[in-house]
Image (spheres, rainbow, N blue to C red):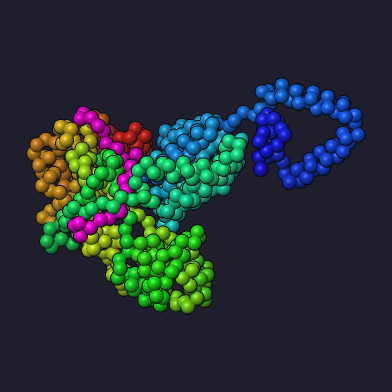
Amino acid sequence: MNLSVTNSPFTEGQAKQINELLHTLSPNQQVWLSGYLMANQQSNTSTDSVEQHNLDDNTEAMLHEKEPSVEPEARSITILYGSESGNAQGLAEIFEQRLSDIGNDVTLKSMDDFKPKNLKKVEDLFIITSTHGEGDPPDNAVELHEYIHGRKAPKLDGVRFSVLALGDQTYEFFCQTGKDFDNRLAELGAERLYHRTDCDVDYEEDAEKWMANVINTIDSTPAGTESEQVVSESIKSAKEKKYSKSNPYDAEVLTNINLNGRGSDKETRHIELLLDNFGEEYEPGDCVVVLPQNDPAIVDLLISTLGWSPETQVLINEDGDTLNLEEALTSHFEITKLTKPLIENAAIFFDNEELSEKIQDKEWIQNYVEGRDLIDLLNDFATTELQPENLHQLLRKLPPREYSISSSYKATPDEVHITVGAVRYQAHGRERSGVCSVQFAERIQEGDTIPIYLKRNPNFKFPQDESTPVIMIGPGTGVAPFRSYMQEREELGFEGNTWLFFGDQHFTTDFLYQTEWQEWLEDGTLSKLDVAFSRDTDKKVYVQHKIAENSEQFNRWIENGATIYVCGDESKMAKDVHQAIKNVLIKEQNLSETDAEEYLKQMKRDKRYQRDVY
């Protein structure tokens, strides 16, 4: 408990001094001090009461007079975020607001807006970062991440810190960037103020607890205020200003059509949703977040495999909330993916000797979870020990799905469009499908409703002027945000200075929104269009090859101030496109590989090279 004027006989200044001292004492030192004060009190009781009264008055007056000169200075707080899709930035902004509201001096910056050399000047440092790809830092965190792991990283004695890490447990390197920052800051001599918190895709509750505990640790709350309640209310109020995961909007499906032609190997759905009395605007680059449901056929098969009744009541959280089994498996729990923690927990609840042996091999776990689901796990490692009340300890919540918006609010203020590629594949002897994409493809009809909310993407923003050249690279469904931007430019009356690179398998069946692109090209809204259809030629041609073919002109656009946008597959396309752009700089500007990479890093810092890759 912290002392204050409301719960002790001390003045505010005295209470602060005592609190400051107590926080620095070890348990042994506290015991010694307690005995010393008791002995001192007994000695003082033998003195004259009048003298003691005068001493008390004099001491009180002296301490009161001295208060301003001995009050400890509040430490400045720096919050740095590394964010790819905006989640970490959103949490950082909420945390900054909360700390500022209770009187702290707070600096909030994206990691790429923070000068690494200033790291040694900070006092209390809070890192909020996601992890991208296979354990990589987000684009705006790369430079700081490299700096602190390099030879020039400073000693950070006197710096206090804590890390909030965002990630996805389906990936091998879960929350790796947060772990990297946490470990390295400690190695550089900084004091860990509060332990790192690693958040899965359902991050809100863990993030709230981290914020509350950090605030309790730095003792920044007013006397008598419960930190966790304050933080929770802050986040809650931030959410209540708009629709959210806990408060979604039921959008009516106006249109749900297949964009691919007959004979295509793909199915890409164009979805138009009604936003009647929605009350929120969106911009090109933003996302629609959909709360999906699992396939009823998969749910039925899983219930049959478990051997339980669909009406069985199951716990869905530690608060005691329940749903019947069928509803819980349909809308609450993720059942189509396995994670390392799930496998490890299954070994406990299944009481299966073979599984218990296999989880000792971490490489086996990583290989086994790939492409398998809960039904596979139950079939491969039979159990009669798993009980309905343990299900919430085994499964995580069903994550929402994010889709880039493919319409302009200025063009269709009462609608929002998304472009969804249906995912279907075979693995381990069974047909598999994407939870949300195939829900749209097979089970959602026009007139149905779907729960959604909007999500801003501050790291993928387009220029709002006509003069800035814009290069857009978006094969497949990656073209979605560029359709949104072109609709916006058309509404604003902007012409020219736009160049699209689009690619897919076949021209005749897979040229998404073909008519619209051709019309924009004809009326001058779009300046240049280059397409690559990989299966129409003997040698496969992709968008990166089209960049190479237009190397001289591509470089000219860059030198004229163009901003480059890349959207789509992260694992291969985005890396190949990055190398192709780098090759343009090497060839046309005679740069070395290192200098070309640095050139692109500077473009990222200047917001002239933005990516929305997944």
Residue 173, x across and y down, in percent: 45, 55
Q: Please, is residue 152 above or below residue 61 in the view?
A: below
In the image, what residue occupies the spot 45% across and 39% down? Answer: 94
In the image, what residue occupies the spot 44% across and 34% down? Answer: 109
Q: Is residue 67 magenta?
A: no
Residue 326, x across and y down, in percent: 36, 69
Q: Is residue 583 visible?
A: no
- Residue 535 falls left or right of residue 250: left
Q: Please, is residue 479 above or below residue 172 in the view?
A: above
In the image, what residue occupies the spot 34% across and 46% down? Answer: 243
**Location of residue 427 (image quadrant):** bottom left
Compare residues 509 and 446 and report the one nearer the observer.
Answer: 446
Residue extending furthest toward the front: 50
**Location of residue 304 (image quadrant):** bottom left
Q: Is residue 460 magenta?
A: yes
Residue 537, x across and y down, in percent: 14, 55
Compare residues 551 and 527 and report the one nearer the observer.
Answer: 527
In the image, what residue occupies the spot 81% across and 38% down? Answer: 37
- Residue 116 falls left or right of residue 590: right
- Residue 165 falls left or right of residue 330: right
Q: Is residue 405 visible?
A: yes
- Residue 310 falls left or right of residue 449: right
Task: Please name the predominant secondary structure of the magenta segment in the image.
Answer: loop
Compare residues 373 and 586 and report the one nearer the observer.
Answer: 373
Compare residues 489 and 544 and report the one nearer the observer.
Answer: 489
Placement of the N terminus among the 4 image quadrants: top right
Residue extending furthest toward the left: 522
Q: How many marks?
A: 0
Residue 56, x across and y down, in percent: 80, 27
Boundaries of the magenta span: 445-467
